[in-house]
Amino acid sequence: MEEEQNNLIRFRYETDEINKMDLSVFVKSLNGIYESYETFMSQPKYKVLPPHSLKIVEIRHKCIEIDLLSVACNVVPIFTTENIHTGIEFLKRLYELTKFFSSVFKDINNERNVIPPTLQESQQFCDIIAPVANGQAKQFNGSSINGDVYNYNIDIHINGEDAPNMMANIEEHIKSIEKEHTLQLDRVLLTIHQARNSSENSGDKSIVNEISKQAVKTTFESSSIKNQMLHPLSGNPFDQKYLVDILVSYKNNKPTEYRILKLREVIPLKNADSTKQIEFDFDDKQ
């Protein structure tokens, strides 16, 4: 069947014969998946939000399987390379959230490159795993599929032992979101948005697309790093990408400062045309 060939992501709830799943909890979990996908696809890097819907394709004894498909004009499911990529990226994000809220939550250094969940993501993920955390489902799984063939090495598995602890970690994270905190990210790509040729750590801004599309205040661990980045051998600093290790400061779960700890590589932009649009505010006063 055409629908069986168009499966994108499969979510599976394993139910229990003794503890029946409450319909309101189940519906809320499904809505959490749907809203999580909408939130994920609303990121600036996805210029066009593809039409999407949740479609239940099969209900079996002790198991409910739900496939997330991209649907065009509410007529027939479509399955393209672009949809595979966005769906897989969404599943990867759910996998990251699973790891973030699992036992490694207490040792965040093990998950340095996981972007902290937003308040919205945290609340949605809480709804998704509620059936397992409440003991109404044995486990929750998420995998990428194409028909009946599993693709990619992404497998989300949350059982009845892990879910309650994850719920507690979600509540703790939500409480901490309003507080200021920092997170080190290694090997991220950064572009300079505004720069001052000064020894002072002020007036500089940069963009790290995987964190935010907005320019963020930027400081440097040393004057040597700043000099290498503002005076690259290949020319204009605005026409480069920089592979760096950074310490990100957050407030209300939004980045407020990037501190560049290490410069790993300078990568010239091909056909760069950003110089005309970006402020180049160099001040030679030392």
Image (spheres, rainbow, N blue to C red):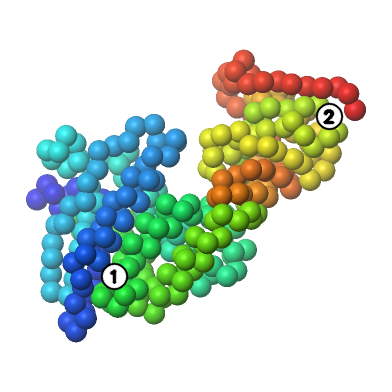
- Mark 1 surroundings within 10 Å by alpha-carbon count, few (fewer than 14), some (14 through 19), many (20 or more): many
Q: Residue at x 82, y 43 (%)?
A: 222
Q: Is residue 258 visible?
A: yes
N-term-proximal mark, 2 vs 1? 1
Q: Residue at x 36, y 71 (%)?
A: 158
Q: Left or right of 281: which side holds 105?
A: left
Q: Residue at x 46, y 53 (%)?
A: 119
Instruction: Say which amino acid is labelled 1.
Output: Pro
- Compared to 71, does 63 lie above or below? below
Q: Which residue is mark 2?
A: 198
Q: Which numbered disc covers residue 131?
A: 1
Q: Position of residue 59 (x, y in %)?
A: 13, 65
Q: Residue at x 81, y 26 (%)?
A: 197
Q: Is residue 139 visible?
A: no
Instruction: Say which amino acid is labelled 2.
Output: Ser
Q: Position of residue 244 (x, y in %)?
A: 67, 44
Measured Cα–Cα span from mark 2 to mark 1: 56 Å
Q: Position of residue 151 (x, y in %)?
A: 32, 56
Q: Secondary structure at mark 2?
A: loop
Q: Which of the 4 image quadrants contains residue 209?
A: top right
- Mark 2 surroundings within 10 Å by alpha-carbon count, few (fewer than 14), some (14 through 19), many (20 or more): some
Q: Left or right of 109: which side holds 163?
A: left
Q: Nearer the viewer, residue 44 or 122?
A: 122
